[in-house]
Amino acid sequence: MHEPSDFMRRFERKAPDDCWLWMGSLDKDGYGIYYYHGAIVRAQRFLCYFLWGANYFPPSFIVGTLCRNKRCMNPRHFIISTRSEVSKRIHEEQWKQGKHYARLTKDQIIAARKEFMGKRGDITRLARKYGTSVSTMNRIIHHKNCRGAK
Ligand SMILES: [Zn+2]
């Protein structure tokens, strides 16, 4: 890791419970970014590599923050997850909020049911086509808890 001091001086280490704000560049979403060997790396991600070593993390890992501060560089506020955990959690939250059919219109639900041939892999194919999870598509096809389209 070259010039760690260059990276470390781009944020201020404060009290353990405070947010440590990234003072360097930000991407269009407001997250800190760092240029490393010509590549752009999320600053939070880079800090994880720096602190724990790149081998510690799966390639798909994501850094979130408990404080929901996109510029926060306090590792105590980090939540490390993999993409599959994240999509699972998002799906669970949508399910709890009853948003699991929000993405499909009544017409789409009817169309999806018409396209369902009862073959192996159909649900997965339809889920991909309509952008739902497989379990959501399974419920849509089998009319479970489905409001709006009878
Ligand atoms: Zn924070």
Image: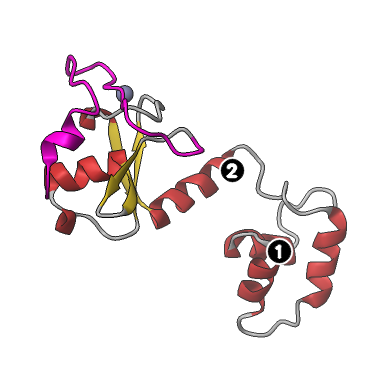
- The percent coordinates of residue 42 (x first, y second) are 34, 44
Asked if the residue at tag 1 contacts the one at tag 2, i.e. Cβ–Cβ closer than 8 Å, the answer is no
- The percent coordinates of residue 39 (x first, y second) are 32, 54
Residue sitting at 24 percent across and 27 percent down?
Answer: 74
Residue farthest toward the bottom in the current orientation of the protein:
119
Q: How is the image coloured?
A: secondary structure
Residue sitting at 66 percent across and 78 percent down?
Answer: 122
Mark 2 or mark 1, which is nearer to you? 1
Q: Which residues are magenta?
A: 1-29
Query: Which amino acid type is shown beneath numbered disc 1?
Result: Tyr
Magenta stretch encompasses residue 18 = yes
Residue sitting at 71 percent across and 82 percent down?
Answer: 118
- The percent coordinates of residue 75 (x first, y second) are 22, 32
Q: Quadrant of residue 136?
A: bottom right
Q: Quadrant of ligand 1?
A: top left
Residue that mark 1 sits on:
130
Q: Quadrant of residue 139?
A: bottom right
Say which element carries label 1: helix
Identify the mark nearer the N-term, 2 or 1: 2
Left/right placement of residue 86 relative to residue 134 reads left
Neighbours of disc 1 within 10 Å: few (<14), some (14-19), many (20+):
some
Quadrant of image for the C terminus: bottom right
Q: Is residue 108 above or below residue 31?
A: below
In the foreground, 76 or 46: 46
Residue that mark 2 sits on:
94
* Whether residue 3 can be seen here: yes
Left/right placement of residue 44 relative to residue 70 reads left
Residue sitting at 45 percent across and 39 percent down?
Answer: 27
Magenta stretch encompasses residue 34 = no
Cβ at disc 2 under 8 Å from ligand 1: no
